[in-house]
Image (spheres, rainbow, N blue to C red):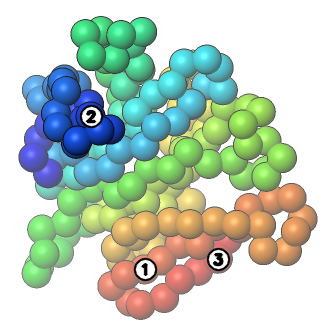
Amino acid sequence: FDEKVAMYRVSLKDGSLISSVVIDDKTILSAYSVAIVNLNNDRDKQLLINNHEKDDATNGVFAYTFPKDLMKGEWKKTTLASNFKKKFSLFVPNMSPGFPYNFWPKVADEGKKPGHILVAGDGDYTASIMTPTGKLAYNIDPIKDMGGTVGALTWGDLNNDGWNELFIPNYDKSYVKIY
């Protein structure tokens, strides 16, 4: 939550700092998670990042495209989804979105097609799926409003039918549903 995304190069010999670069300290706000992904299933990699905000107008899921020179190049930011509607809570100020995940519903598609993005809505109480519609472009659809905090997601092909089952928790009511 330090309102910055940065990269640090450290020496493998003694752990000393070699160099660093600030990727975003102007627009990311409360950075929440970072994953190295290949959203388009091409040669370009991205950082898949979300922020975690109380204000619906400033929250979102973003991709930062790797430049050729990681330390001196421009990290292009693309907003993939925004305006997650957090629910009212009397005791805790809800924040959204939760963690985004690169995801393939069909197991055999992983690494062969552009992935979907799952979003644990956290304070909006909803698990959502973002379906690719073009290069770094997505439609977002709710999977389920769980009526409580959806803080993290996981999946696996439980019945070996080639399709991932999705585990969606409700942290506030202490249960997990499988879809």
Image quadrant assignment for residue 79: top left
Give the residue pinned by disc 3.
Answer: 178
Is 112 placed above or below 3 here? above
Establish if 30 lies above or below 164. above
Q: Is residue 45 left or right of residue 34?
A: right
Which amino acid does the dot numbered 3 rest on?
Answer: Ile
Apparent side of residue 144 relative to residue 32 in the rendered image (left or right): right
Picture coordinates of residue 75 (x, y %)?
31, 17
Amino acid tagged 2:
Ser
The one of 68 and 48 positioned closer to us in this rendering: 68
Q: Single out the mark in the foreground, 2 or 1.
A: 2
Q: Earlier in the sequence, mark 1 or mark 3?
A: 1
Which-is-in-front pick, marks 2 and 3? Answer: 2
Q: Label 2 to label 3, Cα distance in Å?
A: 44 Å
Q: Relative to residue 11, is residue 40 drawn left or right? A: right
Q: Disc 1 versus disc 3: distance between alpha carbons?
A: 11 Å
- Can residue 155 be seen here? yes
Residue at the spot 34% in from the left edge and 73% down from the top edge:
149
Q: Is residue 61 visible?
A: no
Where is residue 163, by image quadrant? bottom right
Asked where in the image residue 50 lies, by quadrant, the reply is top left
Determine the residue positioned at 73% across, 43% down.
110
The residue that appears at 51% across and 25% down in the rendered structure is: 45
Camera-side residue of 85 and 167: 167
Which numbered dot is residue 170? 1
Mark with earlier residue (2, 1): 2
- State yes or no: discs 2 and 1 in contact (Cβ < 8 Å): no
